[in-house]
Amino acid sequence: MYLCTLFANTYMIIPESIDHNKLPEHIAIIMDGNGRWAKERGEDRVYGHYEGVRSVRAIVDACGELGIGYLTLYAFSAENWNRPKAEVDALMELLVNTIRKEVEELKKNNVRLHVIGDFESLPEICQQELNEAMEMTAANTGLNLILALSYSSRDEIAMAVRKIAEKVKSGALRIEDITDETIKQHLYTAAFPDPELMIRTSGEYRISNYLLYQLAYSELYFTNVHWPDFRKENLYEALLNYQQRERRFGKTSEQIQSVNPTHAQGNEE
């Protein structure tokens, strides 16, 4: 099991009630509540971020066991640069140290690392460690672990529009040929499927500039559990909730059930 020797308490038997034929291919998570979790314990906010790494390990482990194809974690938003310098510096140091410690386990457990966001805005040492980790795991064929770093979905969309506009200006693309697929091909996530399930921890009910285009038809799941307390059993609860939904994508329940009566799921109006 992934990292089970270091964190044996995270290992749990996957509930039989989870239908492995109805798992999302891609899960996106907003890892919220590290600071509040720490404050509730009389600790500095940074302590919560360090403890949150345990949850990352547990959830990566769980997704690998379940056979999930893609896991995107909102690790650091573009807006997070506005936090106190001491906290930002600590987060960057944590990022570097974590990548250094975990890359061998990622490689060993067939996890491939990706990064989306404004990569150039990260400190040089962070870019170096991330590039090395992505290179070391590039041949892995299991879980794709995607870290959203210095990420802003509005900036991502604006970037895509600029790239498309440049192609139109140069004559490489006609305006009438621009489609939804054209936009997708110019986003950071062009190589990945859209998330079917988005989880946000810590009781907040916002998307917070996260994958705005990609979440158009995602099922949203909110939990009051702070991220440092989020473990495999919490992920299983989210998955069971997801599997109880009927995903209609604008169709009626009758239409969905007539196509696949045993696997209708979701709740899109």
Image: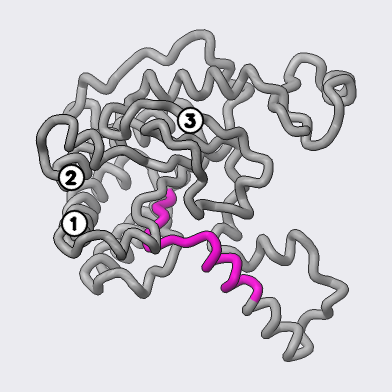
Tell me how far mark 3 sits from mark 1, CA to CA. 26 Å
Query: Residue 251: which quarter of the image?
Result: top right
Crowding at dot 3, Cα within 10 Å, few <14 / some 14-19 / many 20+, comes out as some
| Residue that label 2 marks | 45
Q: What residue is at 23 percent from the left and 46 percent from the top?
A: 102
Pointer 3 with pointer 2, Cβ within 8 A: no
Pointer 1 with pointer 2, Cβ within 8 A: yes
Numbered tag placed on residue 222 in the rendering: 3
Residue 64 appears in view? no
Q: What residue is at 30 percent from the left and 64 percent from the top?
A: 82
Query: Residue 143: which quarter of the image?
Result: top left
| Quadrant of the rendering where the N terminus is positioned | top left
Residue type indicated by callout 2: Arg
Residue type indicated by callout 1: Glu
Q: What residue is at 39 percent from the left and 44 percent from the top?
A: 111
Is residue 12 placed above or below 164 in the rendered structure? above
Numbered tag placed on residue 87 in the rendering: 1
